[in-house]
Image (spheres, rainbow, N blue to C red):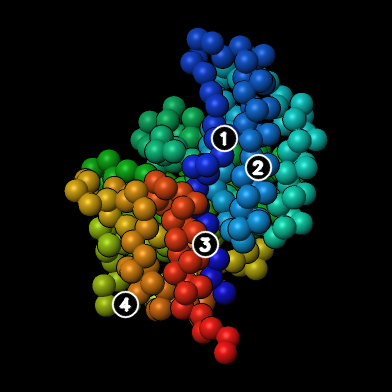
Amino acid sequence: MIRIGYACINTKLDAPNRTCRLKNATPEKILELAAANVEALQPILDWNAAQGIELFRITSDLIPFGSHPINTVPWWRILESQLARLGDFIARKGLRVSMHPGQFTILNSPRREVVANSVKELEYHTAVLDALGVDNSHKIVIHLGGVYGDKAESLSRFVENCKRLNSRIRARLVIENDERCYTVDDVLGASRAIGVPVVFDVFHHVWNPALEALPVRLIIGLAAKTWRKRDGRVKIHYSNQWPGGPAGAHSKSINVGKFLRFYDTIHDLDLDIMLEVKDKEQSVLKLFRALNARQPRAA
């Protein structure tokens, strides 16, 4: 069975990513914004469940300045009941949520302060999912980072820094190939070294290919072998190139024809597919309509 989801916001509903400037980030303001963001998640999850959309990526901005020293608010305790209700809803409806820290979460940086800040960011993301009370099939996706003039050394640094992460973070961590630095083959190697699953990004693979002798379906199979039962269903990312945009830029909306051709090669697999497109839920609905149109009509 294939499940399809989208990331961070619903274009028709309030976004759960209200924030403020650092100079205005008092504890009272941070808590006010965090409470409003948590509250805004419920209508999105309600809408998703009603539409049969079981996958959703929660924005990293749910708690303003979540990993920044300015945020001294024990939000996980103050908002405990609201977060628990969301987690209960997620469990009852069979939804799956994830998070994806931004580009400055770089575990293989040669700068110690960057690595330290990256660990804090992962601690924050883990705290959000833990506060929801969801199990470890609800993941945190990261890239391997930069090359810094020596790919082998940088890859080794990523592995060593990952091994130092606490067990709560590592239980939720998944790693993804990117469009410039690290191919799916690189990520599969890192996975073997640190024992975390691989999210295969089909679009990034187009721009930064590896294992060229293998069709995408078989590469998905290699990634699938890195997932254990406790990690939940195998997950991949899918998107299209933005016409006229820089290489690797995600399109505004999904190309239905291209997706259907891809779908025909993997339709019999058990997969969760996260779309990375700018029109969010609208692309998921487009694919639902296209797939439903293919179903044989009753006589």
Give the percent coordinates (x, y) of residue 138. 62, 53
Rendered view: 142 above or below 193: above
Question: CA separation, marks 3 and 2?
Answer: 19 Å
Q: Secondary structure at mark 4?
A: loop
Q: Secondary structure at mark 2?
A: helix
Residue linked to disc 3? 4
Write the residue at 66% across / 56% down.
50
Question: CA separation, marks 4 and 2?
Answer: 42 Å
Question: CA separation, marks 3 and 1?
Answer: 21 Å
Question: CA separation, marks 4 and 1?
Answer: 43 Å
Task: Give the mark nearer the N terminus: 3 vs 2.
Answer: 3
Which is more toward the observer, 166 or 255? 255
> Which residue type carries mark 1?
Asp
Rendered view: 221 above or below 198: below
Per the rendering, the mark at residue 277 is none
Residue linked to disc 2? 43
Rendered view: 169 above or below 123: below
Lateral position of residue 196 relative to residue 251, left or right: right
Residue linked to disc 4? 214
> Which residue type carries mark 2?
Pro
Residue linked to disc 1? 14
Count neighbours of disc 3 (C-alpha within 10 A) and say few if under 14, some if 14 to 19, many if 20 or more: many
Task: Give the mark nearer the N terminus: 4 vs 2.
Answer: 2
